[in-house]
Image (spheres, rainbow, N blue to C red):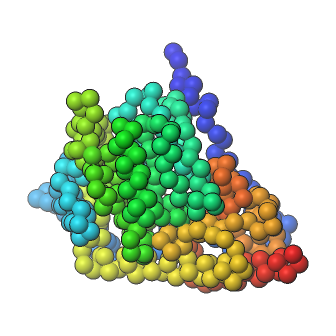
Amino acid sequence: MWLNTHYQALNEQYLFSQIARRVGQYKEQNPSARVISLGIGDVTRPLVPAVVEALNRGVEEMSKAETFHGYGPEQGYPFLREAIVEYYERRGVALDLDEVFVSDGAKSDLGNILDLFHQENIALIPDPVYPVYVDTNLMAGRTIHYIKAVKENDFLPLPDWDVSCDLVYLCSPNNPTGAAYSKSALTEWVRYTIEKGAVLLYDAAYESFIQEDGVPHSIYEIPEANTCAIEFCSFSKMAGFTGLRCSWTVVPKGLRFGGMGLNSMWLRRQTTKFNGVPYIVQRAAQAVFSPEGLEQVEATLSYYRENAATIQQALEQAGIYYTGGKNSPYIWMECPGAMDSWQFFQQLLEQAQVVGTPGAGFGENGKGFFRLTAFGSHEDTKEAAERLEKLLLQWKERG
Ligand SMILES: *Cc1c(COP(=O)(O)O)cnc(C)c1O
């Protein structure tokens, strides 16, 4: 019996436990301090009424023999896939119904998609990064090349044509940096992927936060992306489904290599290893795309956007470099005074009682940066942003 020893290559999951340990220690020593977190990485607003009504109707249906649903299609009910196809149509992207696969999470699909690729493939992954891309490849023993996302390229690296690879990972708008690619930058990435005979794994989990014109919501807004890209998207951040669980993945039929089609491979993979998303949850997800659902979800997104703007204003007042916020719930700020991200974490905790996420937890290039999130309440975010601004200005005055 042999174990998968590639697990030994994984880093300790130390970021959030270390944060909790340091905050706990501070609170123990300062029991009266009001510590506010701008590090929340999960949505906090409740499900919108249209979604709750659909859930209730689904429960009703399941309670009667005439409308009961057992095993459903593994790739998702047509009613939900049709709603997703229409969502893309509104942006001028045409998809076939059987190119859309409903699933229980973008994270699951990002991991599971690697079933379709040979272990010898090389993965190209930006640094800093959402750790799932790295860990799922390490678990399979795959070689990873990192591309540097740094201040010099505004955390939006372009392809290095001298470097070859097989799997390209992009996340836009990005977690953790909040930076979002323009159409021309994505066009270059698509050209590169095609030229290298690679596949682009495109994570669009935050597309609903995009506000700027000219920032694509889907990789399929780029010509020929339907011959090289798989897109992962999710109801998690868009509609507060992190606890309910529903997402989708688009695998176009134009992705064919060596006589094999990725669309039929993924269908085979899912029908073999996945049982589908609960009927009730798929009805809830469908309700997100109803006129009321979209309007209500938009109100929740605006709530978070207001928080993002509050944080951005504080950083601008203090003259701090940052990315994100505009098209994303994340704001990625440069640590002042050449502090590293853990030093800044500690200073911010002790002097302003504000918690965020050290950039070092997302990769080498995150070491001088810090992630703030817009998922808190208005009250807390305002208070925390004021404290942050005050502290940054104090430091600036002292030089
Ligand atoms: C939250 C998040 C997702 C969505 O994950 P789910 O599994 O659908 O909840 C995907 N990618 C990134 C980068 C995320 O931050």
Residue 302, relative to residue 134: is it above or below?
below
Kindly give the residue lying farthest to the top in the view shown.
1
Quarter that holds the C terminus: bottom right
Residue 243 visible to an observer of this rendering: no
Q: Is 359 positioned to the left or the right of 285 in the image?
A: right
Judged from this view, the residue extending furthest toward the right is 398
What residue sits 47% from the left and 43% below the top? Answer: 161
Q: Which residue is found at the position 66% from the left and 80% from the top?
A: 316
Left or right of residue 91, residue 358 in this image: right
Residue 134 is left or right of residue 361, and the answer is left
Residue 311 image position (x, y, % from top left): 62, 78
Nearest the viewer among 81 and 22 is 81
Front-most of residues 5 and 244: 5
**Is 133 left, or right, of 56 in this rendering?**
right
Q: For residue 291, which quarter of the picture?
A: bottom left
Q: Quadrant of residue 241?
A: bottom left
In the picture shown, does residue 9 fall above or below 312?
Answer: above
